[in-house]
Image (cartoon, rainbow, N blue to C red):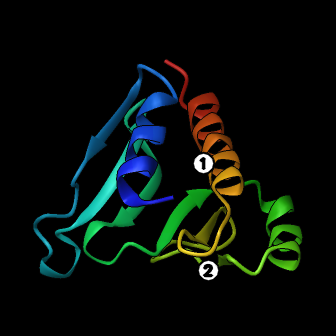
Amino acid sequence: MNIEDYRAYCLSLGTDVEERLPFTAFKSAQGVLAFYVHGHIFSFLDCDNYGIITLKCQPERIEELKAQYTCITKPFNLPPKHWIGIDATTASDQLLQQLTRNSYQIVKAKYKQ
């Protein structure tokens, strides 16, 4: 899935999804695009180096996912207890969509307004 398709997919998850470039004050993170639900990030990626997408995940699923899929890796700059990285260049579109929807649902449920 290319970056444009991934962006469209994230925005299609609900009318409550917003996209932002939240780290423009930091030179090395100016191209980081984040997707939010209820004001909280559920996915982010570097537009300048599209590869690893960081997603929220249930802690009890992380080791199983890592064992099952080689595209699952450490998250970028977040604690690996609640976050995963997924290599968008090697992951199937179906897996990327499934894990992104899961991340969206985790954050949406936690921060219901």
For the residue pair 88 and 21, the one nearer the viewer reads as 88
Give the labeled residue for mark 2: 74
Residue at 80% across, 74% down: 69
Looking at the image, residue 17 sits to the left or right of residue 30; the answer is right
Query: Considering only order in the chain, which callout, 1 or 2, is on the residue closer to the N terminus?
Result: 2
Give the labeled residue for mark 1: 100
Looking at the image, residue 57 sits to the left or right of residue 32; the answer is right
Residue 11 spot, x, y in % from top left: 41, 34
Residue at 25% across, 74% down: 48
Q: Amino acid at mark 1?
A: Thr
Question: In the rendered image, which quarter is residue 106 located in?
Answer: top right
Residue at 75% across, 81% down: 70
Assign a secondary structure to mark 2.
loop
Q: Which mark is residue 3?
A: none
Find out whether the residues at labels 2 and 1 contact each other: C-beta distance under 8 Å.
no
Looking at the image, residue 48 sits to the left or right of residue 93; the answer is left
Assign a secondary structure to mark 1.
helix
Q: Is residue 60 above or below residue 86?
A: above
Residue 93 spot, x, y in % from top left: 63, 55
Residue 38 spot, x, y in % from top left: 43, 29
For the residue pair 11 and 90, the one nearer the viewer reads as 90
For the residue pair 79 and 105, the one nearer the viewer reads as 105
Q: How many marks?
A: 2
Tell me if mark 1 has few (under 14), some (14-19) or many (20+) residues whose alpha carbon lies within 10 angstroms of its own. Answer: many
- The residues tagged by marks 2 and 1 sit, at their Cα atoms, a distance apart of 15 Å
Residue at 88% across, 78% down: 67
Q: Is residue 81 above or below residue 102?
A: below
For the residue pair 25 and 65, the one nearer the viewer reads as 65
Tell me if mark 2 has few (under 14), some (14-19) or many (20+) residues whose alpha carbon lies within 10 angstroms of its own. Answer: many
Residue 4 spot, x, y in % from top left: 35, 51
Q: Amino acid at mark 2?
A: Lys
